Amino acid sequence: MAVKKIQSALVSVFYKDNLEPIIALLKKHGVKIYSTGGTQKFIEEQGAEVIPVEELTSYPSIFGGRVKTLHPKVFGGILYRRENDGDVSQAAEFDIPAIDLVIVDLYPFEETVASGASEADIIEKIDIGGISLIRAAAKNFKDVTIIASKNQYAELEAKLEAQNGGTTLEDRRYFAAQAFQVSSHYDTHIFNYFNQSEGIPSLKVSESRAKALRYGENPHQSAHFYGDLEGLFDQLNGKELSYNNLVDVDAAVNLIAEFPDQTAFAILKHTNACGCATAETVKEAYQKAFAADTTSAFGGVLVTNQTVDKAAAEEMHSLFFEVLIAPNFTEEALEVLKGKKNRILLRQKMALPGTKMIKTLLNGVIEQDKDLATESKSDFKVATKKAPSEKEMDALVFAAKVCKHTKSNTIVLSNDNQLFASGVGQTSRVDALRQAIIKAKEFGFDLKGAVMASDAFFPFPDCVEIAHEAGITAVVQPGGSIKDQDSIDYCDAHGMSMVMTGVRHFKH
């Protein structure tokens, strides 16, 4: 494909990092450079000649720099079609020079918002001239090369080096596509900033950081992760995270966040906890979590909210697991855990951000608030004549937290610091309860005095009947069934206590 030599360039950037090699190449190939303000000074310091935009437009920078490049001589030089006789004639008539290359790096709007700056400072970081230059140059990609981000400096440098200071049409079209990605991403974040208060019913999502995954849920499905995973985790060991790893890791960190004031440990398989416990130490919490289901723990995702020490690492080292997440690891623990090279170790650096969830569905997208409601004792309304004991109250709080993060229909059986078993993803609540009872007995748990949590109400009293027969003494559920009284009456008749939260926690 034919190479078009760049003869003139407009350079106006916020970040100057790594721009020096580009300037050196433009100087080497005798390119006429136009620039403004700080960028002009930077280019001159590189020993290159610069024509100030004010000299081109015969108009000064005004309004504190808000208006610099917004002028027909600038945009005409970018937009006029070199093969169009009328455009060429008008460019000559109005003394509009051709501009073959535009390099722009926008004001850092996202970074300014993230810094917690004042609204006045944020508004000043809405780029007007830069975004207009990007759109104009990208539109006229047949004649103009557009570099819209500092992240593309190296690509441009390689092209100019390899092609004697020029670009091909294929190059220019590629850079135009990148430019519209930059501009649409920029505008999305500006809209979302304003829409925090305006609440316009419009969904705009843009994430330019992409990571190709080995495959999706199954080997025949391709997949990508879009987001800043490195901002959330340091990966200290192991192979690359897979699609299924990421789904389980998300579930794990959401569950463990429910225990901010306790030393907690959880083991998850397919986003459901097969073990969860609190204790004095990470080692003890792991032992109790593992005891809940020693079979399902194989190949699981492990998570804790405390530093993993050598004692805990040695305890779990014999288990084959995919991922371990913790806020930190001692050096001695890492030495033990890195003994298996594929084992993924993640150091979590921050809490999960965001309050919304998005999912593709049918021919559209559904969006909802995250389920951030977590019930405590003060949220429990005692529905039965007998109130739970203080120990049972603690157990009900623990069970409700695990239940909230388990696939519906679900039933969770526990005491105050250890998951005994759960019935997950069943088509009836009775089936979920029976599954939980069978698993608890299989792993040696005595359910006498245990508690039960349900993610939704009981439409009939059958669940409390089955629970009572298994030895369950206290129940937490949302309530709201037209037949709530039937379950309450059964509990009253058999010495059970029941509390209602008024909050359902379906998880599909």
Image: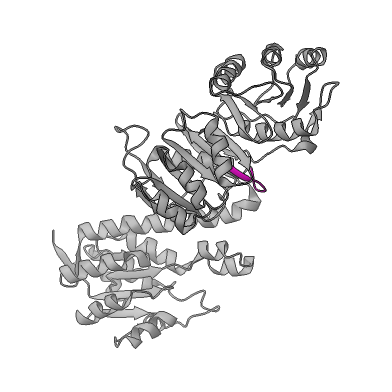
Q: How is the image coloured?
A: one colour
The residue sitting at 55% across, 33% down in the picture is 275
x then y, percent, for residue 32: 27, 80
Left or right: residue 180 compared with residue 170: right
Give the quadrant of residue 374: top right
Identify the image quadrant of the C terminus: top right
**In this image, 74 relative to 280: left or right?**
left
Left or right: where 304 falls relative to 452: left
Percent of width and height locating residue 373:
68, 39
**Is 139 located above or below residue 435 in the figure?**
below
**Span of residues in magenta:** 259-265
Name the residue nearer the viewer: 47 or 352: 352
Of residue 311 and residue 225, the one placed in the foreground of this image is 311
Identify whether 161 is placed above or below 368: below
Quadrant including the N terminus = bottom left
Look at the image and tell me whether residue 202 can be seen.
no
- Quarter occupied by residue 11: bottom left
Q: Does 236 sit above or below residue 286? A: below
Q: Position of residue 218 (x, y in %)?
A: 34, 32
Depth check, front residue: 285 or 12:
285
Residue 469 visible in the shown view: yes
Rendered residue at 34%/70% (across/down): 103
- Location of residue 105 in the rendering, given as x and y in whole percent from the top left corner: 40, 68
Q: Is residue 67 magenta?
A: no
Question: Please, which residue is most extreme toward the left here?
Answer: 1
Q: In the rendered view, does 329 fall on the left or right side of 85? A: right
